[in-house]
């Protein structure tokens, strides 16, 4: 890579379609159904409220999206909330002196989101690749429980591959985003239709398919079991298997396999959530606390609409197109795609594939696709269907990681131009006109975060049993890095922890953006109470409520406790470091916290 830099400005090349597609690529419904369903299913006892949690998160995001759209009308430019904060405060007589502090707090806080989010995505790519490799070569890798070393390797390689694409320029990135959006939306609608059809054609008591995690396939018969002692000497039912790992069928008096008859129980004998007995259960609240916990996780699948405001410097008509792109991207992906696909996936759950099985899998949506493929295309067709759909997920993860890396690098670039972070971040590549130094640094950070995300993929509630660990293919890439069941159960789930840390940064950024909107339109002649007061206040309160639930929820028995507190710890460390950096950097450069001249903010 030629390390050429320039102080030139970005070139306006993006229209409404390009801007919208970049934001839609970050929201990526195809990727996040595959990714987040597993994370949401692992949040303790709150899984029944998964769909309504998305609705709550969507309302929060819509309020925030309106704020971003309105600010983009006032201040088109590069830097998103960071730039909005500076302009909003500078343009008010009473608070303009706080402009530098305000924009630094917003910019620094946004990095908690923009620098962790791509790392979560590259970690997820490691999980996806592990699942696919395990499906194709089960003797080398377990599809349900891929090896940590393999997932880490993929995360590192993928991080720098995405950085290379981002480094090449925004037009190439936009072309990739448009193509991938079309493919992934088509694929998820196909999955949703098939899931609806399967559930409607398989009422309780009819012959159906049940999934076996060990072999990674679905079968139409009851599994034969035998009593065996586990590591603690407790007698457990264990599936009897052929030499190749295929479960043996239970035989009736005539020696024929007993067909599997599907059921849709709400919970098992221990009270663990299994499935939704009827459609109303899917959309039900079940418990307000459950819904809030699910919303704090679901925010991950909806963020990204604001990313388009970072491309103001590259938009042909920023004032007209950026606000539209913010709202359109969220409505199409969040209010349409996600609500359909999450309803379909939750409604599909049954005794043949219960939530207890889904929460212990690295890719529950992939498992569902195996069942659906077998049902529609015959035995063996499930894996082919899953692999085809998984390829679209692979593409979607590329698009969402690329979009976020582009956005995060541009926020860092804006801070570099203002000398709020090292100045070399504020330079563009002379040929590609991309903030290449910020991109490559972000690639390194993403690789580290990605490795952390997959290091304890089954920590806490989804901890693998010791019997499962012994059954894994043994090898450096397939089993090395997995501790014992007790160790995993005592550790936080690493992917959920990093997801919540990114989400906490999102809540901080969105709450601050709502405040910026209140400041920006205060006292202006074009002030409108609904858009510039009621909606921003609602967005602010909603974001703060979700942030508060990180602390309150575990004490009320909702969800797990290790992961939210670890996420809060990461946010606290980042805030403390930011304060120290701001003070020391200001002192070194002779800058004051309070602006003394509007031209030098």
Image (tube, helix red, strand yellow):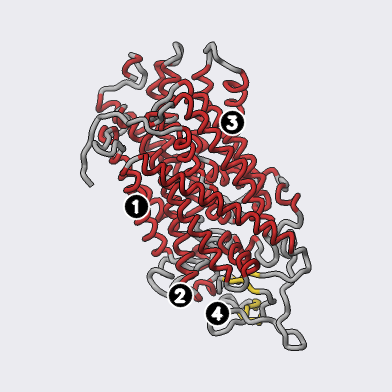
Question: In the image, is residue 589 above or below residue 187?
Answer: above
**Figure quadrant of the C terminus:** top left
Q: Which residue was labeled with disc 4?
A: 245
Q: Nearer the viewer, mark 2 or mark 1?
A: 1
Point out the tag, 1 or 4, that comes first from the N-terminus.
1
Query: Which image quadrant for residue 578?
Result: top left
Q: Which residue was labeled with disc 3?
A: 63
Q: Residue at x 66, y 70 (%)?
A: 210
How far across and how far down the image is residue 500, in percent?
Answer: 51, 46
Residue 561 seen in render: yes
Point out the tag, 4 or 3, that comes first from the N-terminus.
3
Q: Nearer the viewer, mark 2 or mark 4?
A: 4
Q: Which residue was labeled with disc 2?
A: 473
As helix, strand or loop, the secondary structure at mark 3 comes to: helix
Point out the tag, 3 or 1, that comes first from the N-terminus.
3
Tell me the crowding category of disc 2: few under 14, some 14 to 19, or many 20 or more residues within 10 angstroms, Cα based: some
Question: In the image, is residue 336 above or below residue 584?
Answer: below
């Amino acid at each position: 890579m030629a390390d050429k830099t320039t102080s030139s400005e970005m070139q306006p090349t993006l229209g409404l379609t390009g801007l919208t597609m970049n934001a839609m690529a970050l929201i990526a419904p195809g990727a996040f159904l595959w990714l987040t369903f597993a994370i949401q299913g692992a949040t303790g006892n709150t899984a029944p409220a998964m769909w309504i949690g998305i609705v709550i998160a969507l309302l929060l995001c819509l309020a925030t999206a309106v704020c971003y759209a309105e600010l983009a009308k006032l201040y088109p430019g590069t830097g998103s909330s960071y730039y909005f904060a500076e302009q909003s405060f500078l343009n008010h007589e009473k608070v303009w002196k706080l402009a530098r502090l305000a924009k630094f707090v917003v910019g620094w806080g946004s990095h908690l989101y923009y620098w962790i989010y791509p790392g979560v995505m590259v970690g997820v790519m490691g999980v996806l690749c592990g699942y696919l490799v395990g499906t194709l070569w089960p003797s080398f890798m377990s599809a349900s429980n891929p090896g940590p070393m393999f997932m880490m390797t993929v995360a590192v390689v993928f991080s720098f591959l995405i950085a290379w694409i981002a480094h090449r320029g925004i037009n190439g990135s936009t072309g990739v985003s448009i193509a991938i959006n079309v493919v992934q939306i088509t694929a998820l609608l196909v999955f949703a239709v098939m899931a609806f059809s399967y559930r409607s054609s398989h009422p309780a008591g009819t012959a159906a398919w049940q999934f076996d995690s060990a072999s990674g396939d679905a079968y139409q018969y009851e599994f034969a079991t035998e009593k065996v002692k586990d590591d603690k000497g407790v007698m457990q039912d264990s599936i009897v298997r052929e030499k190749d790992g295929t479960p043996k069928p239970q035989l009736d008096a005539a020696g024929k396999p007993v067909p599997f008859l599907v059921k849709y129980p709400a919970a098992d004998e221990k009270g663990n959530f299994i499935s939704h007995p009827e459609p109303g259960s899917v959309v039900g609240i079940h418990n307000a606390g459950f819904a809030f916990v699910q919303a704090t996780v679901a925010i991950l699948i909806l963020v990204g609409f604001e990313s388009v405001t970072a491309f103001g410097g590259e938009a042909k008509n920023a004032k007209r197109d950026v606000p539209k792109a913010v709202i359109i991207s969220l409505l199409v992906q969040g209010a349409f795609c996600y609500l359909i696909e999450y309803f379909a996936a939750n409604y599909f759950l049954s005794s043949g594939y219960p939530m207890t099985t889904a929460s212990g899998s690295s890719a529950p949506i992939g498992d569902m696709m195996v069942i659906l493929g077998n049902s529609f295309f015959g035995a063996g067709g499930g894996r082919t269907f899953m692999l085809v759909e998984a390829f679209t997920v692979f593409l979607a993860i590329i698009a969402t990681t690329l979009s976020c890396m582009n956005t995060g690098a541009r926020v860092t670039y804006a801070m570099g131009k203002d000398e709020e972070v090292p100045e070399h971040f504020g330079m563009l590549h002379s040929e590609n006109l991309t903030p290449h130094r910020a991109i490559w640094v972000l690639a390194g950070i993403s690789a580290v975060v990605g490795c952390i995300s997959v290091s304890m993929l089954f920590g806490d509630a989804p901890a693998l049993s010791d019997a499962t660990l012994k059954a894994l293919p043994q090898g450096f890439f397939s089993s090395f890095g997995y501790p014992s069941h007790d160790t995993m159960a005592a550790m936080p789930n690493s992917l959920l922890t990093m997801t919540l840390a990114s989400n906490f940064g999102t809540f901080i950024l969105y709450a601050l953006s709502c405040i910026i909107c209140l400041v920006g339109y205060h006292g202006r002649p074009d002030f409108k109470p609904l858009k510039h007061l009621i909606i921003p206040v609602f967005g602010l309160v909603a974001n703060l409520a979700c942030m508060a639930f990180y602390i309150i929820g575990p004490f009320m028995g909702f969800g797990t406790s290790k992961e939210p507190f670890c996420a809060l710890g990461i946010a606290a460390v980042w805030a403390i470091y930011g304060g120290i950096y701001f003070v020391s950097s200001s002192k070194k450069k002779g800058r004051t916290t309070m602006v003394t001249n509007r031209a030098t903010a």
